[in-house]
Amino acid sequence: MPPAEVPEEVLTTPFTDYLLRNAAEDRPAFTCRTFPGPADHTLTWPEVLARVRGVARELRRCTRPGDRVAIVARQDLGYVVAFLGTLYAGRVAVPLSVPSGRTGRARIESAFADATPAACLTSKDFLDKIPSGAVVAVEDIEPGDAEPPAEVAMTDPAYLQYTSGSTSRPAGAVISHRALVASCWQTTRCYHADASAHLAGWVPFFHDMGLVLLIGTPVFLGAHSVFFTPMEFVRDPLRWIRLLAEHPRAVTAAPNFAFDLAAEAAGELADVDLSHVNSVLNGSEPIKAASLDAFDRAFAPFGLPRTAVKPCYGLAEATVFVASAGDEGATVTTFDGGARLVSVGRPYGQRIRIVDKEIWVSGPNVADGYWGRPDRGDAFTEDGWLRTGDLGFVHDGELYVTGRLKDLIIVDGRNHHPQDVEATVEAAHPAIRAGRVAAFAVRDGRGEGVAVVAGCTAPADEVETAVRRAVSAGHDLPLRALWLVPPGAVPRTSSGKVSRAAARDRWWGENERHG
C-alpha cells in the first residue's frame, strides 16, 4: 500500500526542539482534570519547559547518558514533566503504571528486571513501593531555568515501550527519537491537526496510545492536551464525552470497549454540542461494527459527525500508529458469510504488506527491536520489516485486521478467529456482557478445541444452553468448556483489553491441575 512520506525535516529535528519552540508563547500546554469538581490544573508551555529543565538537572546529577529512567507515577502533570524531562536529559524513559494490586506490582518488577533503570521518577506516595535504584519524587524537583537539552542522535533510544500484556518475560520495544517524531507527524497528517487542536482523553500514559496522543503529539504541534485518569472514565464514561464537547477541534482515542461504555451511559447526558469534534479514534483492540453503530446512535443527536469516528490500527512496536480511517470516517464492509468487518484505513508514512495473511509494516516509526535482545527477536526482519503477529488483508485499498496469529484456534484443520466466537457468544443471550468474553484454544485427550469464559449478569442453565447452541450453529464447534462468571472477573490487560491468555491460564489451567 503506497504511503505518504514523512518529511526529512521532521526525521532530523530532535523532539526537544519542539519544547523550546513552544516555550516562546505563554499558552496552555497540559491540563489535568481531577474529580470531584471537576477542577483543572494547567501548565503553560514556559512552565512546562522550566519543570522539564528541573527534572533534567536532577537526572544528570544521579544518572549517566543512556541510562534508563523508570516513570512510576500518577496520571497527572508530574508524569508529563517526568517523561519529557527524561528525554530532555538524554536518558531513556521507561513509562510504567502505578504499583496497584498484585498484578500491577508484578508487571513493574518484571519491567525493572528487564530494563534495569538507574533511577525512578515517581509520585510522593509511591516512594516506598519502587523495586530498586535512585528514587526521586517529581513533586520535590524545583524548576530550572538554564539547563540545555541533551545532544542526541535521532537513532538514539528515546524510551522503552513495554506491551500491556502480562508475560513471563516482558518485551520493551526500543522507540528512537526518530520513531517518536515520525509517529507524531503521522497523527497530525492523518487528522489535519495543528496548534489550535485539543488532544483530549484518559488513556493511560504508560500505554502507547496515551503516551503519543496526549504527551508526544501536543509537544510536536504546540497544541493543548487535556486529560484525566482511566479510573475517572470508568466511574463515569460521560466525562470523556463532556471533555470533547468543551474543547473545539478535539482529537481523542480509546479502545473499542470505551465506545460501548459511553454509548450505554448516553441516556444520562445533558445537552452538549459535539459538532466541533475533529476525530474520535477507535483502536488498540478489535473494533466491532456494532459498537460503532451504537456510538453513532447515542451521540449523533448531540451533533457528533459520523465521519469523526475513525477506526485505526497500531502497536507498540510501530510507535502506536500504522493505519487509520481519514476524512471519510468508518468503513464497514459485509463479506461472504455475512461478516461485517471494520476497515482500519490506510497507512500514513509507512508501508504495509500481507505475508501469509500476516500484516507486515516498514517505516521510520518502527521500533529498533526489543531492549536487551541483539537478535531483535522474531518480530523484526533483517531488511527492516516488522512482523506484527496480526492477521489481516487489504480490500479496495483498505486494511482489515482479522485476528492475532498466536490466538488463532485450529480445530480439525479449520481456522477460527477467537473474536468471531466471542461475538457469537455475546449475541447468544442478553445476560452475556459485551466486551467481557474470552475465547481461546485448549488441548486435551480429544485434541484441540475451544473454550470460553463469559461475563454474565445472571448465570443460568438457559444461558449456558443458548451459548453452546449459538457457537455450534455459527461455527460448527462444540465448546470444550464454558465458564459463566461475574463480568468483572474476566481478566483484562492494563490497557483494558480482555486477556485471553490470562483467562486460559486461570480457568483451563485450574481445570488441568485438578484433572
Image (spheres, grey):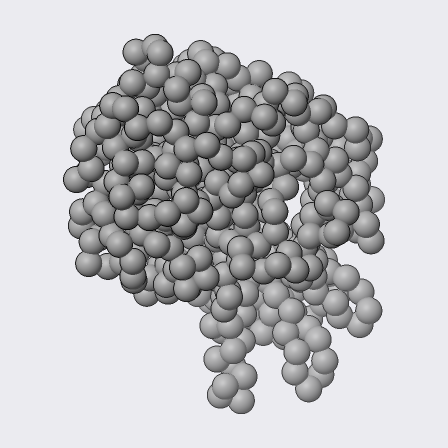
| Vertical relation: 197 (above or below) 212 | above
Name the foreground residue: 318 vs 415: 318
Q: Quadrant of residue 6?
A: top right
Please state the horizontal and vertical placement of residue 280, each as a whole percent of the image: 51, 27
Name the one closer to the observer, 302 or 23.
23
- Kindly tell me whether residue 249 is visible in this rendering: no
User: Going 41% across and 50% down the picture, which residue do you hit?
Assistant: 68
Residue 204, quarter of picture = top left
The residue drawn where x is 71% and y is 30% is 346
Seen in the picture, residue 432 relative to 412 is either above or below; the reply is above
Q: Please tell me which residue lies in front, 183 or 340.
A: 183
Q: Residue at x 70, y 75 (%)?
A: 448
Q: How many marks?
A: 0
- Residue at screen point 20% across, 53% down: 127
Residue 60's spot in the image, x, y percent? 31, 41
Place of residue 221 in the rendered image (x, y in percent of width and height, measured from the top left): 47, 19
Q: Quadrant of the N terminus?
A: top right
Height in image: 337 above or below 233?
A: below
In the rendered structure, the answer to whether residue 232 lies left or right of residue 506 reads left
* Left or right for 513, reference 109: right
Residue 438, relative to residue 345: is it above or below?
below
Residue 323 point in image, percent of width and height:
66, 34
Residue 327 in sight from this viewpoint: yes
